[in-house]
Image (tube, helix red, strand yellow):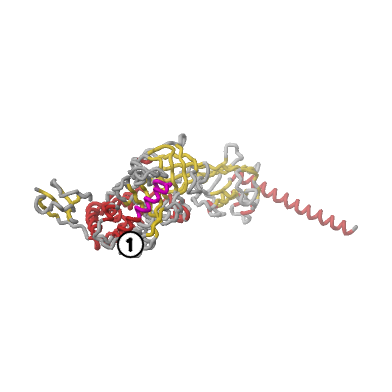
Amino acid sequence: MKTKKRHTITALAQWLTIALMALSSQALFAATNATAEQEGFYMVGWLNNWNSNDKSLPLTRCDDGQTWEITVAPTDTEESLHGWFKIAPASAYGNGNFWNLLLCAPYDGCQELEGTMTWGGGGAWKLPRDRETASYTIRVNPTTMRYQIQIEKREYRPWSGTLPVLHIDTQQEVTSKETYVEGTYYIDALGLEGYESLGSAEEPLPLQIKGRGNYTWSSFQKKPYRLKLGEKARPLGMKASRHFTLLAHADDDLAWLRNTVGFELSRQMGLAYTPEQQPVEVMMNGEYRGLYMLTDKIRVAKNRVDIAEQADNETDPALVTGGWLVEIDNYNEDTQVRIKESNGEMLRFTCHSPEVLSEVQRQYLTQLMTTADHAIYNPDKTDTAWEQLIDMDVLARYYIVQELMDDAESFHGSCYIYKDRGDDARLMFGPVWDFGNTFRRSLHHFIYDNPPYGQNWIGEIAKFPRFQQRVRELWQHYLAHGEPVMHDFIDDFISQIAAAAVTDAQRWPQYSQADTAQRATEFKRRLNEKTSFLKSQWGDLDVGITTIATGKEASETDNNWYLPDGRRLQAKPEKKGMYIHRGKLVVVGR
C-alpha cells in the first residue's frame, strides 16, 4: 500500500508541475499578446533572411481592430525554393527568448491557407515561390488565434511575346509516331505585325497530331510532331495545306540555324521547291513546350512537290512511271525498295508517294534505280547516259547546298528524289531536308571524302567532267548572288527568335540556346570556312566582264550559256544582256 500511495503522490506532483508551467506559459503569452496588440506584429522569415532584429516587414491592423495583415511578393522564380515564415510580436524583439515568443503555424512546413495558430517556437508556414504567384496576403488574429493566407495569381504567360503562339489541346498524350491523336489548335498572333491569328481559344480548329522523326523522336525530351489539320489553312502565311510538321531541333546547337540556312541556300540556288518554315512558340495541353519551327510536310501537291500523283497499288505500266517521291534512307523499313550500289553499299528507297506498292510498281522502281546506278558507275566518265536518267542541273544545285552546309549524310539519309510521269521524265534531287548533321567535322574536304555515315552516288557522280563544269558555273551564281546576303539573312533570323530562345532555354535548360548571338557568330565562322575551301576548289568570283558580239565569238553549237539566275539557254543568246558563259560573266551586245 505504501508503494502504491507513493506512486500516486509522485504522479500528482508531476501533473501539478506541468499544469503550473502551462498556466505560467499562458500568462506569459497573454501578456505578450496584450503588448503586441498595442505595439504591432512583424513578419520574420525568408524575406528578411530570418533576421530577428529586422522590423522591415510590419503587419497593418485591419478595421476590425483585431486582425493584422501584410501583402508580400515572392523574391524569385525558382520553383524548387519555398518561403518559410513566422509572425513576431513587437514585444519579442530584444528578448533573449525571441524564437519562443512568436505566432506560428500549427506544424512545421504548413501549407494550409487557413487554420489555427500556436504561440511559441513551434511550426512555420511554407509557401511555394513560383512564376504564377504575384503576391501573398497574410492575415492573423492573435485574439482568436486564427490565420488566413490569400494567394494572388498572375496571368502566367511563359512565352516570349515576340512570336505567335500555337496552342494545341489533345484528348490524350502524344506518345506514338504511328497513331494520330485527336485534338484542336489555334494560333494567337498576339497582335504582332506581319502575322494573323488562326482560330481562337473560344473557337479552336480541329487537328490530328502524332510524333515524327527517328533519332529526334527517341533521343530527346523535346519532341517533334506531325500535324494534320482538319481543313486546309495558311498558318502564319504559309502556303495552304492540311499537312505540317513541328520541328523541335533539340539536336541543333547552332541556334536553329542548320535547317534555316540550308533552306535559304536552296532558295538561293533556285531549286523548284524549298519547304517553308515559320518560328512559333508552342503550348500543348496548357504546358509551354518551347520554340519550334512550323514546317511544311514534304509531299506531292501543287504547291509542294508538283508532279502527277500516283495511286497506291497501281498496276497500269503507263501510270507507274510517275509520279514518284522517294527518299534515300538510312533506316531499314520493311516496305523499302533496296538495291546494292555498285560500290557494295546498300541503297534504301523509302516511298512517300505512292506509299503502298504493287508488284508492278516495285519492279519499275527497282529497275529504274538499278539502271541509274549502272550509268553512274560507268567507268567512261565522258558518257552522258546518266544525264538521261537524272537531271544534272537540278542535282548540281542540290549538291552545292549540301557542300556549303557540309552535310555529312546528305546523300545517305533524308535525301529526297522525285520523278514526274513519263518514260522521258528524269529523276530530280530534292527538296532539301534535315541538316542536323551539318558542320560537325573538319570543313576542308568534300562531303563524299571519308563520310562518317556514307554518301550514296554523289562521290561517283562528282567524277563526271560535265557535272564538275556545271557545278563551277552555278558556284559563280552563288558567289555573285547568294554569298553577299547570307550573313544579313542569319542576323535577321536570330533577331526574330532571340527572345523566344531565352524562354525555350528556361523550359529546356538541357538544350539551352539562350546565347543565340554567340552561336550565330560560330555558325557564320563555319559557313565562311567551308565557303573558303570550296573557293579553293571551284574558284572565287570571276569579276571580269567580257563584251562580245553574238554573231562572232559565240558558236552556233555552243550551248554553255546561262542566265544570271543559273538557268541554261537552249542556244546562244539572241538578245542583249548579261549572261554566264563557261563560268564567266559576259555582257552580250550587238
Residue sitting at the far right: 1
Residue sitting at the far top: 203
Where residue 225 appears, x then y in whole percent? Answer: 44, 47
Closest to the observer, 24 or 330 = 330
Please indicate whether residue 106 sits to the left or right of residue 368 in the image. right
Please indicate whether residue 27 sits to the left or right of residue 435 in the image. right
Q: Amino acid at mark 1?
A: Tyr
- Residue at image point 26% right, 62% down: 380
Closest to the observer, 558 or 267 = 558
Closest to the observer, 205 or 470 = 470
- Residue at image point 81% right, 55% down: 11
Does residue 342 lie above or below 311 as drawn? below
Using the rendered view, name the quadrant where residue 530 is placed. bottom left
Using the rendered view, name the quadrant where residue 317 is placed. top left
Does residue 236 lie above or below 406 as drawn? above
Which quarter of the figure is the N terminus placed in? bottom right
Where residue 502 appears, x then y in whole percent? Answer: 41, 51
Dominant secondary structure of the residues highlighted in magenta in the image: helix
* Mark 1 lies on residue: 448
Where residue 32 appears, x then y in whole percent? Answer: 64, 48
Disc 1 element: loop
Closest to the observer, 559 or 294 = 559
Stretch in magenta? 352-369
